[in-house]
Image (cartoon, coloured by chain):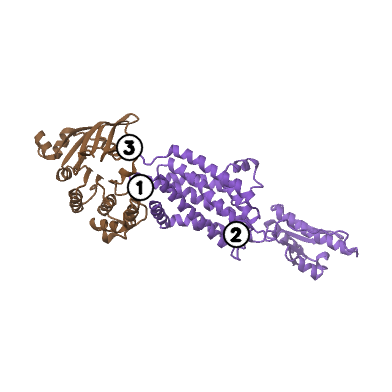
Chain colours: A purple, B brown
Amino acid sequence: MKSFLSLSRAMALGLLRDRAAVFFMLIFPLMFLAMFGALFDSDSTPRAEVVQIGNVKVFDAMPDSQRSALRGVLKIEKTGGSAAARRDALAQVRKGDVDAAVFQGDGKAVELRYSAADSASAGNVRAVVNSVLQQANQAATGQPPAYRLATKQVEDESVKPIQFLTPGLLSWAVAMGGVFGSALNLVSWRKKRILRRLWLSPVTAGSVVGARVGVNLALAFAQTAIFIGLATLPMYGLRLTGHWWLSLPLVACGTLAFMSMGLLIGSWAKTEEAANGLAQLIVLPMAFLSGSFFPLEIAPAWVRTVSDFLPLTHLAEAMQSVMTRGESWGAALPVMGGLLLFAAVVTLIASRFFRWDDA
Amino acid sequence: MTGNAITAEGLRKRYGETQAVDGATFEVRHGEFYGILGPNGAGKTTTLEIVEGLREPDEGTATLLGEPSWPRNKTLLRRIGVQLQASAFFERLSAREQIHTFASIYGVPTARADEMLETVGLAEKSRTRENKLSGGQAQRLSIACALVHDPELVFLDEPTTGLDPQARRNLWDLLRTINSEGRTVVLTTHYMDEAEVLCDRVAIMDEGRVLRVGAPAQLIEELGVRSLEDVFLQLTGREYRE
């Protein structure tokens, strides 16, 4: 027990004093959270910007109440009706500075010109302008509307990108800590002959492995605490659901699974550089293919097939389920079991390659 | 307990095509200062690794303090001290933290560890990180770590390589003290003057075998040469190794 504690202490101090490691395992993922959080937080439905050339009756006659209701989705800028103004407005549409130009056509027609370059904003501006016209048509009948469309999104209204990003990025951070931590530590201790020195002292392999696992678990829980602490700040507004604490055993199982990958890398690699490169080669594609950064619903089928085999995919999904989708044991238990099984199998493979020195 | 601290009998170890150790046999008596000498690639390192219990021999047995060194035996490991290279330290830990870690692994009080640091003259460097120690300081720290649990038998692997003459002489004094306190010391070195000054007996190895064993003065006399270096060159030849 005493040697387990002192080895844990030695490893923890070695890790905390390595500024680069602390940066990559604690600060770097947080930077991603802050960055993505800010990026995705900007209005997801873009406001359509339209230049109105000269007088357009429908728009000019719009009552103030409707005008203010539209303010969130439509911005109208009125210019003069000259031919030069029209050329100028169309040029702006082509360049993408505004989404569309609108002018009075023959008779009752309202002419809309948009660019096909950005199909999403083109569709958006057409829909918005069309709805303005439909309302005006309906109002012209002098009857109350016969039908009305009421919409509401299915998620809790608080659903923001942060609800998706926090569990995903946290899973990624845990994966980095596990893979890099164990791979680099193993290679470095082998190169510095500490493994050999420990073999020649009366410590059990259990103390050495246990100390490393303990330090990594502590790191992973620290990452979890910092992530949740930051994301729940009003600025980011994460809202945790009932069984969010199930993320702790999930993080623990994930740490074991990723440490086993690091063990395999560290057993195979001869130098820190090789271990680092190989770990990058595995962690980075895994992060992208796992859906930790962005949802994979729109990804091609083969990507989703590959994704299904990655431990990070399952961890990230289970973390989302328990932290922000209000799910419970049902979502967490199978994943914990899978991660532990993965850890056992990979550790077994790694033990085949394990060398305690270079000779 | 038998009369010998170490008994190595017919050790053999093969790596692929290379027969690294080819029937090495030697004995080290209790309290003896014993040197193992040989050119690079002579099989010294592998022999020592087998004796220490790091590797299993293909053939033969190594007995330390009356117990076989393979398989790993924790009771035996408490009684031996091994100094590997100066670099075998925990990363980013200070001298004091290093020796405290080793002390607690062996269940030794930290006061004893601080005392050991004092003995090797590193008390003032106790807060210095491992990578900021000079070559000599690092060597002394690694010896202190090997001695922290007061072992009966100490293995030292080229402890003076890369040191300046002052540091070397100081280390010799330290090694003599360790030996005079009754410990058995096994030393490998490339410096023949060092072996001549320190060792009661030396074994000269080449091609995985022990060529000759004896007190330095006795070997010099037997071969009719001037120094241990001449003995070494006469037995192992002058061509380059590795």
Tell me where residue A331 appears, x and y as whole percent: 63, 49
Q: Chain of mark 1?
A: A
User: Which disc number belongs to residue B70?
Assistant: 3
Q: Is residue A281 visible?
A: yes
- Which numbered dot is residue A37? 2
Q: Which amino acid type is marked by label 1?
A: Ile
Mark 2 or 1: the one toward you: 1
Are the residues tagged 1 and 3 within 8 Å (C-beta)?
no
Residue drawn at x 64%, y 47% as measured from the top left? A296
Question: As drawn, is A158 to the left or to the right of A358?
Answer: right
Determine the secondary structure under disc 3: loop
Along the horizontal axis of the image, is B213 left or right of A12?
left
What amino acid is found at the position of numbered circle 3 in the picture?
A: Trp
Percent across and percent down for residue B51 are 28, 38
* Residue sticking out furthest to the top: B17
The quarter of the rendered structure image containing the C terminus of chain B is: top left
Give above or below for A200 relative to A134: above
Question: Which residue corresponds to the image point at 32% horizontal and 37% vertical from the top-left?
Answer: B70
How far is disc 2 from disc 1 in space, using C-alphas?
42 Å
Circle 1 residues within 10 Å: few <14, some 14–19, many ≥20 = many
Residue A84 visible from this viewpoint: no
Seen at 59% across and 65% down, the residue is A233
Where does label 1 land, which residue? A194
Q: Chain of mark 2?
A: A
Helix, strand or loop status at disc 2? helix
Q: Position of residue A3 (x, y in %)?
A: 38, 51
For the residues labelled 3 and 2, the Cα–Cα distance comes to 58 Å
> Disc 1 and disc 3: Cα gap in Å?
20 Å
